[in-house]
Image (spheres, grey):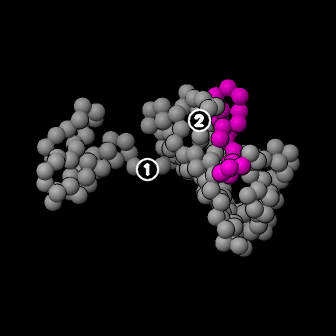
Amino acid sequence: MAGATTNFAWPFPTTGDPANVAPDDQTMLSAVDGTLGNALTAYTPVWTAVTTPPALGTGTLSGRFKQFGKWGWYTINFTPDGTTTFGTGAWRFTLPPTWRMLTLNATAGHVWAFDTSTTTTALGEMIPVAAGPPTTIEFRGHASTVAASVTVPFAWATTDHLYIEGLVELV
């Protein structure tokens, strides 16, 4: 590798030799991992609904996150089971502990929801919902003004799956 940036002394690939691009990229990515760390921290998101609270039962709800200065990356996985009750009203999830988004005017992440009974996939965005620096997000399907709930984007049932990931700017 011929050069280095002024940020963290990360190496960068040189041009002119296609045979070295893949090894140069790998060296660069290893340097970034070594600086920022590649491990995510586990957290348990809080799942609520606006009208009637849901109950996870023995379903699964887990989250992971990593903060890089004023930026944070997070993931949330949710799979209900036969003991899960879905509540009523818009579903909301909390961001990792101590996180507060900088603005309400930003997307807070992307969503992939899967209905196992019909093998239907629904995509959407996570949006912040709290006044002030938000700590809570909710799922809106593409081209939808209605938030996810027990019947949106489909009738939720055992083994359906919700995966959320996002990069947000923090206060």
Residue ID for mark 1:
39
What's the CA distance linking mark 2 and mark 1?
26 Å
Q: Secondary structure at mark 1?
A: loop
In the picture as drawn, the residue positioned furthest to the front comes out as: 143
> Around disc 1, counting alpha carbons within 10 Å, would you say few (fewer than 14), some (14 to 19), or many (20 or more)?
few
**Residue 3 coordinates in the image, percent (x, y):** 16, 40
From the viewer's side, name the closer residue of 73 and 145.
145
- Does the magenta run of residues contain 141? yes
Tell me if I can see residue 41 in this picture.
yes
Q: Quadrant of the C terminus?
A: top right
Lower position in the chain sequence, tag 2 or tag 1:
1
Residue at 26% across / 54% down in the picture?
26
Looking at the rendered structure, the kind of residue marked 1 is: Ala
The range drawn in magenta is: 127-144
Residue 72 pos. (x, y %): 50, 39
Amino acid at the residue labelled 2 = Ala
Residue drawn where x is 62% and y is 56% of the image: 123
Q: Regarding mark 2 in the picture, which secondary structure is present there? A: loop
- For this view, does 28 lie left or right of residue 46? left
Circle number at residue 66 = none
Q: Position of residue 31 (x, y in %)?
A: 27, 46
The residue sitting at 17% across, 46% down in the picture is 14
Which residue: 76% across, 47% down? 146
User: Which numbered disc covers residue 106?
Assistant: 2
